[in-house]
Amino acid sequence: EEIGWRIVIPQNWRIIQREKTEELQSKGQKAIAESTGQEFDTSESRHLVGFQKDQFNFFQSTSEPFEEEYEGAWEENNLALRDVLIQTCRDQGIKVEASEIETEDIGGLEFHKCSFRILSPDGDLIMNVIMYSRLINGFDFGVNINYNNEELGREMLEAWRSSEFDL
């Protein structure tokens, strides 16, 4: 409601229960803390909606209050998060290729977009990750699309790109 977002979940996808999302987030936070030596406070992070086909093909969205203390603070934070995620993967021995941050129009709003390819030690694709983010009404709104099946990835992207925002 606070960001005015609507999405239609594709048919035959399972809603991810909040407990499962929180469990995955906790694992990610531990890996980041081990890599950076820093703890991140996500107590105000709100899980909006998540859906999946299986453990490798899923969609997650979150919002978190973000007070921009100076112009460009959100963009700096977004870039730093990208770099932390790349370094955390590498510290875990995971090969990762990441794009620069680009922009894409979703529902009439410009979002930051960063794509990652997670690779096996032999260079085979394990998973694609596309992260979208935008500051909306004082909230850092993020969407993660994770897939290893191109058709399922297209389904999630189609649902996301059909999102509507009432601001």
Image: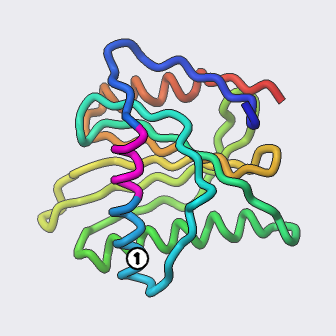
Dominant SS of magenta comes to helix
Q: Quadrant of residue 53?
A: top left
Please tell me which residue lies in front, 74 or 42: 42
| Residue 34 painted magenta | no
Q: Quadrant of the C terminus?
A: top right
The vertical placement of 102 against 30, above or below, is above
Query: Is residue 101 left or right of 1 when viewed as pictured?
Result: left
Residue at the spot 53% in from the left edge and 17% down from the top edge? 8
- The residue under label 1 is which amino acid type? Gln
Residue 93 place in picture, x, y as percent: 23, 75
Residue holding disc 1: 87
Give the SS element for disc 1: helix
Residue at the spot 56% in from the left edge and 37% down from the top edge? 48
The vertical placement of 90 against 28, above or below, is below
**Residue lying at the far bottom of the rendered structure:** 37
Please tell me which residue lies in front, 138 or 149: 138
Residue at the spot 46% in from the left edge and 47% down from the top edge? 130
| Residue 20 painted magenta | yes
Query: Is residue 117 left or right of 56 when viewed as pictured?
Result: right
Q: Which residues are magenta?
A: 18-25
Residue 3 place in picture, x, y as percent: 74, 36
